[in-house]
Each structure stands twice: as structure tokens, then as C-alpha cells.
Image (cartoon, rainbow, N blue to C red):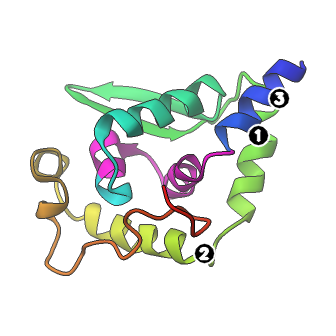
Amino acid sequence: MIETFETVAKAVADPSRVRILKLLEAGELCVCQITTILGLATPTISKHLAALKVAGLLQQRRDGKWVYYRLAERAFNLYAPSFLAMVAAALADDPTIVEDRRLLTMVNEVPVQVLCDQGRAALPAGAASANQGISCCGGPI
């Protein structure tokens, strides 16, 4: 049991993973969308998503070549719902989370195919993230 708790605790101990969880509160997102918002490399995002999925915090579905993630609706991990509730209740006014949500609004206006091909270049001018390269806790990523 303690190993299960530790898996979830480690998954939410990373600032980038917390940012991903906060983004997914708004609904399902493609890996390309998450990558564009966080400004991290796709392999890095994939590792974060895998850790969150192993911890029972995320579910995924495939649609052609795109993989979409959402918060787990039915957690196989006893502790996942409590950790998801804790994350949902925290950091709403954090500047990085606020900026991520601003970018999410823009990202949702761009077709996934275009976003996957162009990344941040597909966003309107001036959409570059002010928080690129910092975590939700203000430290370096």
C-alpha cells in the first residue's frame, strides 16, 4: 500500500506534472497541445504523461496518430482521487498556471493537425508564454 501512495506522491511532486494536471482540469488534451503550452520537448512531456498515467491520475485514448489525455475518471489507484482533488484545489492564482490557461484558450482555437506541425508558431503573434522555462513554483524547469 505504501508503494502505491509513493507512486502517486512522486508523480505530483514535479512542477511540470502539476501544470499538466491543472491544464487537464479543463478537459482532454492532445500531447501536441500540452507540449505547445508548456514549451517543453515532446519526449519530456511524454515521460511526464507516462508517470502520471502509471500513478493512475490520467487516462488516454488514441485518435489516429494523436494521443489524448484526460484526468482519470475511475482510478485504479486508491490514492489518485485524493491527490487529484488536492491539485484541483491548489494554485488557481499561481502566475504560471494563469499563463498556462491563457495559452490553453489560444491553443484550443488551433486545429490539432496544425498545432502538431507548427507548435507555438501556429499561435497568434504575442502568444509566446511569459512563463516558458519556469515552473509553477517559480523555480527553473
Task: Identify which residue is drawn at 33% across, 72% down.
Answer: 129
Label pair 3/1, CB-CB below 8 angstroms: no
Task: Identify which residue is drawn at 52% across, 30% down.
Answer: 59
Position of residue 79 relative to residue 85, above or below, is: above
Of the pair 55 and 43, the residue shown nearer to us = 43
Residue 16 image position (x, y, % from top left):
52, 50
Residue 52 image position (x, y, % from top left):
58, 33
Residue 97 image position (x, y, % from top left):
53, 69
In the picture, the quarter occupied by the N terminus is top right
**Counting residues from the N terminus, which is met first, the one under dot 3 or under dot 1?**
3
SS label for mark 3: helix
Q: Amino acid at mark 1?
A: Pro
CA gap, disc 3 and disc 1: 11 Å
Q: Determine whether, in the image, residue 4 is placed left or right of residue 104.
A: right
Residue 75 image position (x, y, % from top left):
70, 28
Q: Is residue 130 magenta?
A: no
- Magenta extent: 13-35
CA gap, disc 2 and disc 3: 26 Å
- Residue under pointer 2: 94
Task: Identify which residue is drawn at 32% across, 48% down.
Answer: 35
Q: Determine whether, in the image, residue 141 is placed left or right of residue 2.
A: left
- Residue under pointer 1: 81
- Residue under pointer 3: 5
Q: Amino acid at mark 3?
A: Phe
